[in-house]
Image (cartoon, rainbow, N blue to C red):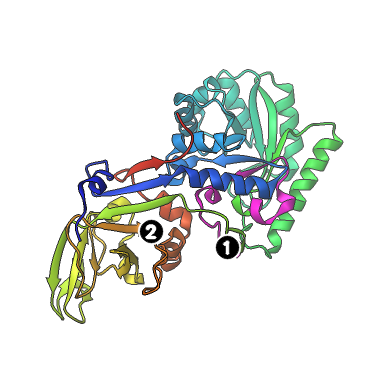
């Protein structure tokens, strides 16, 4: 088989390796989460370049689909959204280095604080009536003030003209393990904090605790809004909530084209270390994508597969920096330029053949002992993103 000129142009970047982002799938996933979490609002987490999906186009899509706000990890990520003309509320999810706060203030970014030093830094950055949210550590032990510090810090916020309280939030450590008792313990601590604030006559503002798993599995965590992250991209937050993810649609597919075809003999070895020996004569297709692009080097050790010619075929030999090799079988009709699907793909098949299951990020993650988040976030900037669907303009 050969690739026609039209399909070759679809790569678009001059490289025979690219990712396609289905913005209609992202919009669909927003709708699923909105229905599940209602009446809570959905704020979309678009940090890390929207988990590798493209922050600006994804942000526009989720807002058009009904998300009320956006969450990022860095002030720089918020500035990128503002530079693209996105005016929706943006929350930076942790305290930031003091030298970034001038930009946060200038761009009206809701800023997380968890200490007196964080509040002082905003004043030093020229803040006036700047919205802040207080992060409470209820058990994650990563970032946030202690529950017994909340009332003191909120009163400090209230007395300062530089800042005003916009919200109070926490983060769940094991929300994807539905039966784990720590989630209930965290929510108990958070509820006690909120009760103390309200008893003191303080309005906590926007209250939130739920990440993607919390939004899907823990109604008690939803409060005023949920922070939807990986679920927006159609990826399960964890195997413990997979049964709640059936309606979600993966948004990212990873594509390449065959760059070289060779025949090998039984007993031949391949790639660095010559760690794979062929048991029989076969055909090998080289694909111009590797670990510098986000395909994990160890994927061949765990029997990773890609789709060539509508069939799953195993990766053979160590994945190299820029290329990988695939055993397409001794009778394969494969040519340079033929399409390869590394993530996504699959087909319904026909009466004569079994359907080909898509390759999902969760599959790579399970094979490698990691999570789907790491797989999509690891697809590097060398891989061009091509966005399809989504809002017009």
Q: Quadrant of residue 353?
A: bottom left
Q: Residue at x 47, y 28 (%)?
A: 79
Q: Nearer the viewer, residue 228 or 124?
A: 228
User: Looking at the rendering, in which quadrant would you find the N terminus?
Assistant: bottom left
The answer to which of marks 1 and 2 sits earlier in the sequence is 1
30, above or below 255, in the image:
above
Q: Residue at x 15, y 81 (%)?
A: 266
Give the total number of marks visible in the rendering.
Answer: 2
The residue where tag 2 is placed is 345
123, above or below 32, in the image:
above
Q: Quadrant of residue 93?
A: top right
* Disc 2, SS: loop
The residue where tag 1 is placed is 242
Q: Is residue 357 left or right of residue 383?
A: right
Q: Residue at x 60, y 61 (%)?
A: 241
User: Looking at the rendering, in which quadrant would you find the C terminus?
Assistant: top left
62, above or below 126, in the image:
below
Can residue 64 be seen in this snapshot? yes
Q: Residue 324: within the magenta? A: no
Q: Residue 227: within the magenta? A: yes
* Magenta residues (range): 214-242
Query: Where residue 286 appears, x then y in whole percent?
Result: 20, 61
The reply to whether the C-beta atoms of the residues labelled 1 and 2 are less than 8 Å apart is no
Bin the neighbour count of mark 1 within 10 Å (Cα to Cα): few under 14, some 14-19, many 20 and up.
some
């Amino acid at each position: 088989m050969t690739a026609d000129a039209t399909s070759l142009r679809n790569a678009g970047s001059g490289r025979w390796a690219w990712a396609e982002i289905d913005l209609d799938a992202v919009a669909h996933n927003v709708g699923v989460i909105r229905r599940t979490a209602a009446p809570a609002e959905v704020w979309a987490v678009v940090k890390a370049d929207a988990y590798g999906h493209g922050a600006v186009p994804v942000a526009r899509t989720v807002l058009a689909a009904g998300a009320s706000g956006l969450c990022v990890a860095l002030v720089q990520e918020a500035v990128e959204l503002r530079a693209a003309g996105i005016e929706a509320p943006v929350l930076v999810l942790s305290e930031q280095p003091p030298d970034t706060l001038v930009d946060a203030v200038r761009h009206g970014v809701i800023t997380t604080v968890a200490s007196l030093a964080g509040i002082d830094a905003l004043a030093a950055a020229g803040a006036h009536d700047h919205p802040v949210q207080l992060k409470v550590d209820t058990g994650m032990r990563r970032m946030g003030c202690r529950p017994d510090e909340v009332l003191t810090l909120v009163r400090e916020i209230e007395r300062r003209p530089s800042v005003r309280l916009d919200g109070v939030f926490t983060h769940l450590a094991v929300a994807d393990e539905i039966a784990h008792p720590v989630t209930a313990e965290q929510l108990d601590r958070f509820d006690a904090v909120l009760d103390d604030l309200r008893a003191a006559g303080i309005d906590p503002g926007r209250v939130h605790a739920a990440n993607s798993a919390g939004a899907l599995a823990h109604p008690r965590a939803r409060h005023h809004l949920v922070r939807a992250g990986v679920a927006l991209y159609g990826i399960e937050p964890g195997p413990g909530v997979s049964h709640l993810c059936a309606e979600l649609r993966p948004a990212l597919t990873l594509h390449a084209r065959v760059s070289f075809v060779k025949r090998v003999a039984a007993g031949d070895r391949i790639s660095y270390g010559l760690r794979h020996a062929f048991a029989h004569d076969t055909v090998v297709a080289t694909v111009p994508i590797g670990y510098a692009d986000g395909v994990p080097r160890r994927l061949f050790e765990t029997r990773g597969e890609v789709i060539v010619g509508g069939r799953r075929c195993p990766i053979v030999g160590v994945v190299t920096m820029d290329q990988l090799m695939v055993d397409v079988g001794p009778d394969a009709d494969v040519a340079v330029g033929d399409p390869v699907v590394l993530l996504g793909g699959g087909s319904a098949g026909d009466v004569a053949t079994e359907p080909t299951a898509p390759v999902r990020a969760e599959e790579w993650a399970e094979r490698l002992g990691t999570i789907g988040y790491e797989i999509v976030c690891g697809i590097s900037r060398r891989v061009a993103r091509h966005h399809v669907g989504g809002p017009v303009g």
